[in-house]
Image: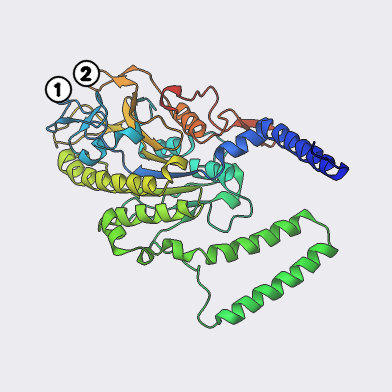
Amino acid sequence: MTNINRRTMLKAGTTALASSMALDVLSQPAMAEELARSGKSVIMLWLAGGASQFETWDPKPGRSTGGPFAKIQTSVPGIEISELMPKMSQRMDTTAIIRSLNTKIADHGQGYELMDTGRVKEPGVRFPHMGAILAHELGQIDSKVPDFVSMYTSTEGRRQGSAGFLGARYNPMFLTNKMMPEDIHRQDSITDSDHKDRAALRSFLAKRFVRDLQNPSIGSHENAYERVHGLMASDHLFDIEKEPQEMRDHYGPTQFGDQCLIARRLVDAGVPFVRVARAWWDSHGQNFETHRELCADLDHCMSALLDDLKQRGLLEKTLVITLGEFGRTPKINGSLGRDHFADAWSCSLSGCGIRGGTVFGKTDEDGKTVADGEMNAGDLFATIFAALGIEHDKEFMVGSRPIPIADFGSTPCQEVLA
């Protein structure tokens, strides 16, 4: 018979108690939610100007609204997309298409606002951009990397999104002129050793100050300094010269490809939200030539991004979204263009939390109206939050007013969730 002494029994009991306490903590809703979204990120491929659903995710060949392009069978039986997206047609196992968006607003400014925030603008309330919300929910308070990066594009203009009532901490790092953040490097007049010595002295003095003066705002100030140092140390993430030429060739020679590669580098380092914009899809004239060019870039870069994320084991925790402010009209105008249209259009979701190889909703045979599964902006946001393990009905308190994270009455689309 094995002898069991008191110390062994106490150790076993303590271990059992600790395990029991840990299981109890993990069973708490807040902790369970935190674990569900831990380490997750989003890359939004923003199709600025409004891409045509007919030439991407919801083709209607043979109809008067369909245009000249055919549809092609994808790797998932029964799902067909535009022939302008041949590479993505072979990657549908990781992607869900939503074909039934009805967001009603077909104006660029208001459409941007709606699809930035998931709700209609209200007087007196500055709603946060999706990226700011996800930076708040997915980021770490002591993170050394940016929480929300928004890539520039030479034709899109200067829309960058705002953290709104969440505060400046969650505003984007917005790259307007080049892909390397400005003012992120130390000045040439300061040597590396001087830079480190200054940081060490400041840290020493700050810690003594915090110890002697107990005030929460002091800690916040200290965190801000630490964050600046972290951001300065993140400059390499924006430098694609750090990547092998083979990987750069994989993404292709375009600006959009370079930005998608940087987006992958950022989420790999723990950045919660990266927005990459591809413009300009606002094809009131020559829609088909415009989409032939833009879809080729989107098809190649999106496919390269999904493949790269998958090979690195990142796709299961990275949600990739294609979205614009609206779609394009079924009617082809006299300039062979399509105009603004928000009544029946499409987007896609790939990767984290998504049931790949699915299509939700449908439009009528001419693509003029939603025939089944109508979804508004709030429902789309609720679906995105649910895919990331975030409760869609969680509330922020703005003064004394509760504001749900997704708009009032929004419901996640369970059909596209894994």
Look at the picture and state if 288 lies above or below 304. Answer: above
**Along the viewing direction, whichever of 142 and 8 lies nearer the viewer:** 8
Q: Residue 206 shows which numbered tag?
A: none
Give the distance between the C-alpha atoms of the residues marked 1 and 2, in whole angstroms.
Answer: 8 Å
In the rendered image, which residue does mark 1 sit on? 63
Query: Badges 1 and 2: C-beta atoms under 8 Å apart?
Result: yes
Q: Which residue is found at the position 51% from the left and 34% from the top?
A: 385
Q: Looking at the figure, which quarter contains the N terminus?
A: top right
Residue type for callout 2 = Glu
Q: Residue furthest right?
A: 6
Label 1 residue SS: loop
Q: Is residue 379 visible?
A: yes
Check the image and report above or below for 300 versus 212.
above
x 15%, y 43%: residue:
289
Q: Residue 1 versus residue 125: which sits nearer the camera?
A: 1
Q: Residue at x 21, y 45 (%)?
A: 296
The spot of residue 80 in percent (x, y) is: 22, 28
> Could you tell me how many numbered marks the image carries?
2
In the rendered image, the quadrant that contains the C terminus is top left
Residue 318 appears at what percent x and percent y?
45, 43
Residue 261 x %, y %: 36, 55
Q: Nearer the viewer, residue 243 or 391?
A: 243
Which residue is label 2 attached to? 365
Task: Name the kind of residue labelled 1 in the image.
Answer: Arg
Considering the numbered disc 2 on the image, is that residue within a helix, a strand or a loop?
Answer: loop
Residue 124 visible to the viewer: no
Q: Is residue 287 left or right of 117 when viewed as pictured?
A: left
- The image quadrant that residue 92 belongs to is top left
